[in-house]
Image (cartoon, rainbow, N blue to C red):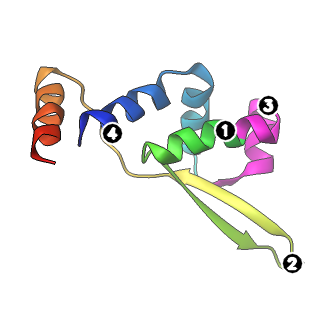
Amino acid sequence: MTSEELLALLAAVGHAQRLRVIAELAEGRMYVSELARRLGVSRPLLYMHLERLETAGLVVGQLELSPDGKALKYYELAPFDVRLNADTILAALREDSQT
């Protein structure tokens, strides 16, 4: 992981609403409208948060068609294990110097 990727990850989890998104998705995969209802936020705002989480590699989105032909965007958690300590930061900086 580079320092840029580490910063994207920290920025993604550095917002209370995005932590709530992660908590909801920890229960299982969900489509955007349902997730927005559960969180009490608009879909455009939710998409902004989901984009940050997806860029950081914490969630994965997939478009599917319902039986009636309606497009539904589903999101689920990606497997992740985040540990932040001095070694994590030093490893990211070393990765930067190798690229």
Q: Position of residue 1 (x, y in %)?
A: 23, 43
Mark number displayed over residue 37: none
Residue at x 66% of width, y 59% of height: 74
Q: Which residue is mark 2?
A: 69
Q: Does the CB distance between marks 2 and 1 fall below 8 Å?
A: no
Mark number displayed over residue 5: 4
Please provide the residue range marked out in magenta.
30-46
Q: Amino acid at mark 3?
A: Val
Q: Identify the element where label 1 is drawn.
A: helix
Q: Position of residue 29 (x, y in %)?
A: 61, 55
Q: Amino acid at mark 1?
A: Met
Q: Identify the element where label 3 is drawn.
A: loop
Q: Which residue is mark 1?
A: 48
Q: Nearer the viewer, residue 25 or 1?
A: 1
Q: Earlier along the polypeptide chain: callout 1 or callout 4?
A: 4
Marks 4 and 2 sit apart, C-alpha to C-alpha, by 37 Å
Q: Is residue 39 magenta?
A: yes
Marks 4 and 3 sit apart, C-alpha to C-alpha, by 27 Å
Nearer to us of marks 4 and 3 is 4
